């Protein structure tokens, strides 16, 4: 049951069968269809989401009415609006399924109790947050150091799975490019 979720946890921390059962009693699995929303701007983010199967994205709508993608999450990745989740305030983001997805959610109201029951999860979530923060720092650096074309090439080389699964307009939005420019860059690579 939920092989990606359990394997990912066990890759980083020790969990015996009883602890896995306890953990599963705290989480809430669910499925989404393509384009379903997990949260919308103005709603409170009520959970941290692990992608068991599928692909999600986080975005906001800028002052010109254009969607600006800020994050993707595919299998074995976590996603949430952490400001909204932590503070239990209105979200400034949307989280949407790019593909039909199976999600494991850790509800906010159960998280503290879960961490008391399984303290090794504190270590796990610290590692995940450190990795996510490091990735965010590198993304900022790439935007300041590399040209738009270099940014695209860097992304494609680091995340080839994404390029095959993400619609071109979403990839363009994430990289701060136009879909037409991404199309030109893809043609150059052929």
Image: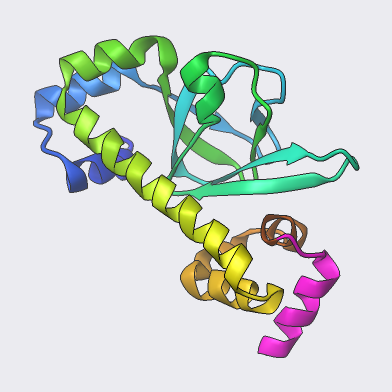
Q: Position of residue 40 (x, y in %)?
A: 70, 25
Q: Is residue 146 something that shows in the picture?
A: yes
**Residue ID at (27%, 45%):** 8
Q: Position of residue 164 (x, y in %)?
A: 60, 67
Q: Is residue 76 something that shows in the picture?
A: no
Residue 182 vertical position relative to residue 141 in the rendered view, above or below: below
**Looking at the image, how many numbered discs can be counted on the residues?**
0
Q: For residue 119: magenta?
A: no
Q: Is residue 15 left or right of residue 42?
A: left
Residue 49 vertical position relative to residue 118 in the rendered view, above or below: below
Q: How is the image coloured?
A: rainbow
Residue 37 vertical position relative to residue 84 in the rendered view, above or below: below
Quarter of the picture holding the C terminus: bottom right
Which range is magenta? 176-190
Q: Position of residue 83 (x, y in %)?
A: 53, 26
Q: For residue 179: magenta?
A: yes
**Residue ID at (56%, 73%):** 156
């Amino acid at each position: 049951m939920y092989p990606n979720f359990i394997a990912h946890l066990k890759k980083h921390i020790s969990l015996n069968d009883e602890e896995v059962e306890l953990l599963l009693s705290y989480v809430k699995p669910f499925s989404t269809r393509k384009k379903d929303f997990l949260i919308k701007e103005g709603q409170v983010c009520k959970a941290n989401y692990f992608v068991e199967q599928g692909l999600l994205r986080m975005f906001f709508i800028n002052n010109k009415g254009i969607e600006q993608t800020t994050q993707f999450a595919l299998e074995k990745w976590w996603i949430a609006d952490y400001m909204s989740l932590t503070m239990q305030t209105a979200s400034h983001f949307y989280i949407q399924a790019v593909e039909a997805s199976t999600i494991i959610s850790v509800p906010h109201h159960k998280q503290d109790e879960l961490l008391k029951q399984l303290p090794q999860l504190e270590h796990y979530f610290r590692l995940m947050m450190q990795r996510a923060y490091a990735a965010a720092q590198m993304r900022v650096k790439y935007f300041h150091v590399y040209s738009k074309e270099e940014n695209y090439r860097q992304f494609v080389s680091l995340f080839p799975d994404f390029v095959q699964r993400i619609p071109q307009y979403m990839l363009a939005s994430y990289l701060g490019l136009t879909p037409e420019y991404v199309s030109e860059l893809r043609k150059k690579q052929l």
